[in-house]
Image (cartoon, helix red, strand yellow):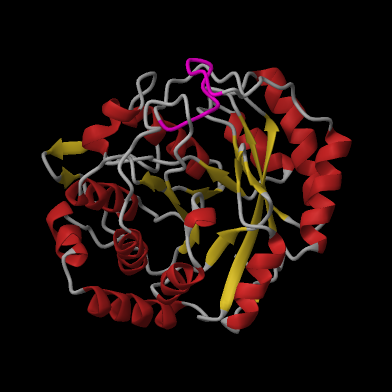
Amino acid sequence: MTTYNLRLKAKNELTPHPTVQYWRKCQVEELFAMPFMELVFKAAQVHRENFDPQAIQLSTLLSIKTGGCPEECEYCPQSARYDTGLEKQVMMDIEEIVEKAKIAKARGASRFCMGAAWRGPKPKDIKVVSNIISAVKALGLETCGTFGLLEEGMAEDLKQAGLDYYNHNLDTDPERYSKIVHTRNHDDRMDTLGKVRNAGLKVCCGGIVGMNETRPERAGLIASLANLDPQPESVPINQLIKVEGTPLENAEVLDWTEFVRTIAVARITMPKSYVRLSAGRTAMPEAMQTLCFMAGANSIFYGEKLLTTCNPEEDSDRLLMDKLDLYPLSYEPSEV
């Protein structure tokens, strides 16, 4: 029996849990439909009730094993099924990973996130990444891993190694999941999230917008995240980075106001979660990012690369934070 056992009962309806407010998809759609400035204002109020609005959690993401993934996700350049020009690489050496983590910490990151392009790790992989996690944790950083679908006992092994967070995104509206991902289903994701929660790990779980979805489908994604019990501690909201060779390379450009609306609705429905501006920030002007912070975003990926795609350079991020009088949240190992 997993902690996350939400399942679709009927159209637009999820099995509720008593410890979180249950959000119907239609209720989330109503939030999206609010006048833009009213929505941002409401989200800003919710944010200030739960967080210091000037503190931003900084995470650095490193791909420790790149390319050659057997999964078929239409948004992902790491899939072996697509010709994106990305060469498959072996696992990085632990010394190189630790050096990258030291640099990230020196530049202000409080969390170091590591990703590997697998459908799911094998037992021998867990032994390798456990050693890596322990070494990074010893530097005084929070640790996060995204390694795909987990088998029984793997989450416990990662927890024992010192992993703090496990990232496992729901990607899109559960009702359109099979249109975007063709080698696993929504229940597979929920099963791994249950294993992660039962092991005592914190959850990093979000999705991607700009994949030709409708506003009701964006609402479905947010509802599925908000109805997890407990809600994810970290919610990355990614804007699709269109990569040549993937099926979504010609996806329609999402209007910037719709992305800000998504951030605001995520903040209102998940008031105590860290809402992270993730992929796609290189295409976001400073004013757009500023509105996202106003609407409740309080975490960013900080570093020159997100797995295989570019990210704003640290200097530009710190300059923007200085302009906005924002400061990095420091990690305290004893904090809950």
On whether residue 334 falls in the magenta region, the answer is no
Q: Which residues are magenta?
A: 75-84
- Counting from the top left corner in percent of width and height, residue 242 is at 44, 38
Q: Is residue 20 left or right of residue 140?
A: left
On whether residue 76 falls in the magenta region, the answer is yes
Is residue 271 positioned above or below 102 on the image? below
- Counting from the top left corner in percent of width and height, residue 82 is at 48, 18
Q: Is residue 284 left or right of residue 182?
A: right
Can the viewer see residue 138 in this picture? no
Q: Name which quarter of the figure residue 90 lies in.
A: top right
Name the residue nearer the viewer: 240 or 249: 249
Q: Looking at the image, which residue is at 53% across and 43% down? A: 167
Q: Looking at the image, which residue is at 40% across and 32% down? A: 249
Name the residue nearer the viewer: 22 or 132: 132
- Counting from the top left corner in percent of width and height, residue 158 is at 66, 37
Is residue 211 positioned above or below 86 on the image? below
Quarter of the image with the C terminus is: bottom right
Is residue 323 positioned above or below 164 on the image? below
Q: Looking at the image, which residue is at 42% across and 44% down? A: 240
Quarter of the image with the N terminus is: top left
Q: Looking at the image, which residue is at 47% across and 20% down? A: 71
Q: Main secondary structure of the magenta part?
A: loop
Q: Is residue 83 left or right of residue 63?
A: left
Is residue 94 positioned above or below 33 on the image? above
